[in-house]
Amino acid sequence: MIPHDSNMDDYPQQSSNQINQEDRPDKQEEACGVFGIYAPGEDVAKLTYFGLYALQHRGQESAGIATFEGTTVHLHKDMGLVSQVFNESVLQELPGNLAVGHTRYSTTGSSRKVNAQPAVVDSRLGKLALAHNGNLVNTVQLREELLQSQCNLVTTTDSEMVAFAIAEEVNAGANWVDGCIQACRRCQGAFSLVIGTPDGVMGVRDPNGIRPLVIGILTGEPERYVLASETCGLDIIGAEYLRDVLPGELVWINEEGLTSIQWQQQSQRKLCIFEMIYFARPDSLMHEETLYSYRMRLGRRLAAESAVEADLVFGVPDSGIPAAIGFSQASGVAYGEGLIKNRYVGRTFIQPTQTMRESGLRMKLNPLKDVLAGKRVVIVDDSIVRGTTSRKLVKTLREAGAVEVHMRISSPPVTHPCFYGIDTDTQDQLIAATKSVAEIAKQLEVDSLAYLSWEGMLEATREDTNSFCSACFTGDYPVAIPEQVKRSKLILEKATV
């Protein structure tokens, strides 16, 4: 994975659909990044490129941009990082007044070019281009409905289904906005959408607001609006954060400005708590502060709940660093760096040999031996999924000279899979679902292990603690998961082993 606010594995990996369990990174894989802009007179393709560049951490498998020049759609998408998919000559071939962009990590549909987004489909009113972050949980039913209507589905993604559902409503006589609303009412699960049309751009969020979506504005006349998964996608192009798209809201942006429609009564807001703990960039704003500040509070609360005598505390780069700083501040244990991350390692599809693995290939993280030698250390990370990478990391620290290794995790134990756009394992693959904390500590070979409490995680948000989805810790899913969806995830998981 690319350098950003995430610790991944000791060497870059392929899609989870292509590798075995032992080789998979010991983290939940990110969601997707969406971006949209309505800015007549501006180079919308280039602005979208930079927006996606800032959102690259949300998905590294593929990237795409669709621009609208009147009724003509210009589309370019491919496998790879944003900087690999686009260059100056490609962007020059994407003229228009509005654009939609996407950077993808696959959670439904295989990792193939045909599944890259935006998804572009025809309709009575012209083409539409859709970028989706999230996962639907009623895809089986929706797919059956679309196939009965003779829709020509060409991908294996739920995102294409949403696009076809909108086109179907438009073909039946609805305008863009009404067609989108009617289609969204057929969808269940998590979806933050950015949709380009010849007449304007729409941004839509599911009634629970599980995945984020924000609105920005570019200064000048006429008003020019931007939609992005996170505020870091606005900052990079100089757009000012205006507000979040509300759960159950549709915003329609065209030459008349921005129109808001509450298409469905808000349910209890359930923003994914892992967006705050890990997925979103630390410089992105949520609840009027950067996530860096929240993550430092997690570390302070973690120190209060599970203090330990040690000489040095450090975080697993990069996602564990803010919590490690907070832990140091609250505990008095000196903060330092014990691991150096290679920030120039991009995503690679070249797998190391077994000999390389056995010799301890360290393309991502390397220990500072003179810093660690003879020290009792506390290593802070944001989560443990399977424990495979954590165990390797502990071994690396001991080999570098650490005399004690204490691990502290700034979230509770992950015990349930996610069905809303995050690629997690099935429950039997989650280490905390089958082992106690003491058993996990033994398997990781640490001197002590402690997780942040569920209450501490939520209280640190300083928001209504009921307004977050924390199903991966509790199994309390805000949108019911059909049994066939649970079974299909298990079948897919077994097929990748």
Image (spheres, rainbow, N blue to C red):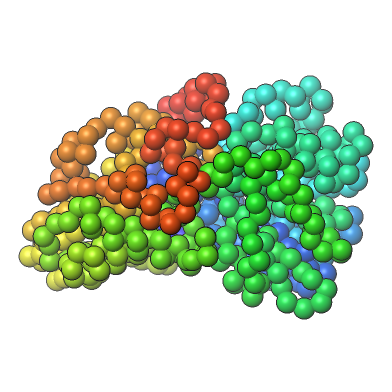
Percent from the top left, x then y, of residue 232? 56, 66
* Horizontal and vertical percent position of residue 389: 29, 47
Relative image position of residue 60 (x, y in whole percent):
53, 54
Above or below residue 404? Residue 267 is above
Give the camera-side residue of 363 and 254: 254
Query: Residue 81, how many percent across, how many down?
Result: 56, 58
Residue at the spot x=45%, y=33% of the render?
A: 476
Spot the residue most to the front: 464
Q: Quadrant of the N terminus?
A: bottom left
In the rendered view, does 21 fall on the left or right side of 137? left
Instruction: Judge whether residue 142 can be spotted in this image.
Output: yes
Q: Is residue 468 left or right of residue 10?
A: right
Q: Nearer the viewer, residue 226 or 290?
A: 290
User: As drawn, is 259 to the left or to the right of 428?
Assistant: right
- The answer to whether any part of residue 91 appears in the image is no
Q: Residue at x 79, y 36 (%)?
A: 182
Q: Which quadrant is home to the C terminus?
A: top left
Which residue does the image show at 59% across and 46% down from the upper left? 209
Q: Is residue 92 left or right of residue 231?
A: right
Compared to residue 396, the image places residue 329 above or below, namely: below
Judged from this view, the residue extending furthest toward the bottom is 220
